Image (spheres, rainbow, N blue to C red):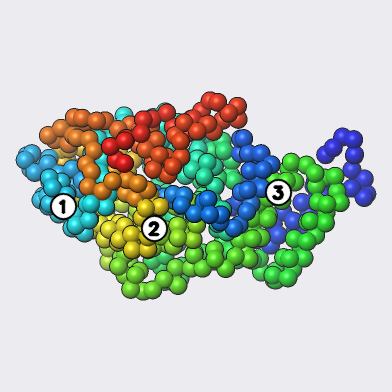
Amino acid sequence: MNPRHPPNRSTPSRRDLLKTGGIAAMGLSLPRLLQSQDRPPGLGTEENAAQSSISPTPARSKEISCIFIHQYGGLSQLDSWDPKPLSSAEIRGPYSPIQTVTPGFQISELMPKLSQMSDKYSVIRSMTHGNAQHDQANAMMLAGRSNPAPDDPSFGAMVTKLRPSFAKIPPHVWLQKYGGGAAPAEQTYLSGGRLGAAVAPMLIGKQHDENPASDDFRVRAFDRSQGISQQRLKTRWQLTQKIQNSSNAGKTSEYDRLDLYQRKSFDLLDSTEAKKAFDIKQEPSTIRERYGQNPLGQNLVLARRLVEAGVRLVNVLAWTGLAPQEKFVSVETWDMHGNADVGIFEDGWNGLPFALPRADQAVATLLTDLEERGLLETTLVVLCGEFGRTPKISRGAKRIGRDHWPNCYSALVAGGGIQGGVVYGESDKQGAYVKSNPVSLEDFTATLFSAMKIDPTSRLSPDGFTLPASTGDVIGDLF
């Protein structure tokens, strides 16, 4: 409160404001997703006003969006993007490599669809870092740093801050929550870190059965509280405006923040475009079937719909679902070291013959769908896990598998100006260590920023000159 104008009967306090007419909630669930505890560093009044805009402008029409697919658990590089057919059986595994449409580039036989479109994407075979723990490695990948601080924002949060969306839809969405004891802390990807909740993602899929492959799936975030009509919401909104205009409390920065996120929430609730984008049942069944009737396939359908509607960044957890008669264990599809009662080469939820063909179908269809709609040029697609797997096959607690291996692994990148048919970096004969062109998490993230036309050295600290978005080097050969 302004000390020159202490509260009295005609001047409600901030506490009164929050109580009046249910202003803090407005009968919506969306403000909880949008309201920030603190204003993001460096966010001034003009930028605040710009972020609240709901109409896309011509200058923003060609900006890049991103669909980041997380292969949680760590995909085996040797059984996917970097096969070693001349190695011994305990290293090469049971799968044969197949030729892609790119001369000299071979990938696993479990990815036939992606093999026929290698001219649409690039593969990095020299990703590397030094941490083999899931939660820590995921936190590192999310922040794009080898030693992230607890409050470091994720890549998605940084993109949302540096390139806010002007569409009438949440700018940052996360599809399918991390689960299991190996999951990273929620503050590393759901909070926005030190940038605040304003850039945190809207989470869809808190439980494993809350995904678009479920028959009863729908996004409930746009639901009004029971008994709250659209007219009543409008009346509440008008009341907040009157109070703001007549009260000294309405001149505070706290009220400005509350007002901004309520306004966004009100706009979203009234937005048929946002509701339509999140309603996957409006998608033709023929297209949904092309992606695959599993959580990953259907989440990628939803991701494409969201990007098409103006969402800047969609994170998708690459959980491929369950085989018939299986019971849910975890969403860590790619953590295939034989500890979940499914061997890495067995046909079950945690095995390559089940999971990799489903990922092949879903990702290949996504790239094709984006291209057919004229969106691939303006949509960066990333497919990557937190690390790879050991070259040597071993026996886990229950079945055969490959253990955690961060020293050398692979990633796919496409769209957003990325060249197709490029294989960057090289591993040694066993796929164990980087032989040429190592790519750190910093380099990888700087490259993603560059693909999204964001300067990796952009400053994200309150003082305006420390803490760049990334300290890595952009991989120019991919562009």
For label 3, the crowd category at 10 Å Cα-Cα, with few meaning under 14, some 14 to 19 and many 20 or more, is some
Q: Position of residue 119 (x, y in %)?
A: 23, 52
Residue located beneath label 1 in the image: 100
Pointer 1 or 3: first along the chain: 1
Disc tally is: 3
Distance from Cα at disc 1 to Cα at disc 3: 53 Å
Which quadrant holds the N terminus? Answer: top right
Which quadrant holds the C terminus? Answer: top left
Image mark for residue 258: 3
Residue located beneath label 2 in the image: 375
Image mark for residue 27: none
SS label for mark 2: loop
Pointer 2 or 3: first along the chain: 3
Q: Position of residue 98 (x, y in %)?
A: 12, 52
**Quarter residue 207 falls in:** bottom left
Residue appearing at x 36%, y 55% in the figure:
376
**Quarter residue 308 falls in:** bottom left
Of 398 and 299, the residue lying toward us? 299
Q: Type of residue at label 1?
A: Thr
**Quarter residue 223 falls in:** bottom right
Pointer 1 or 2: first along the chain: 1
For label 1, the crowd category at 10 Å Cα-Cα, with few meaning under 14, some 14 to 19 and many 20 or more, is many
Of all residues, the one furthest to the front in this rendering is 58
Instruction: Give the number of the mark in front: 2 or 3.
Output: 2
Residues at circles 1 and 3 in contact by the CB criterion of under 8 Å: no
Q: Position of residue 132 (x, y in %)?
A: 31, 34
SS label for mark 1: loop
Relative to 124, 32 lies left or right: right
For label 2, the crowd category at 10 Å Cα-Cα, with few meaning under 14, some 14 to 19 and many 20 or more, is many
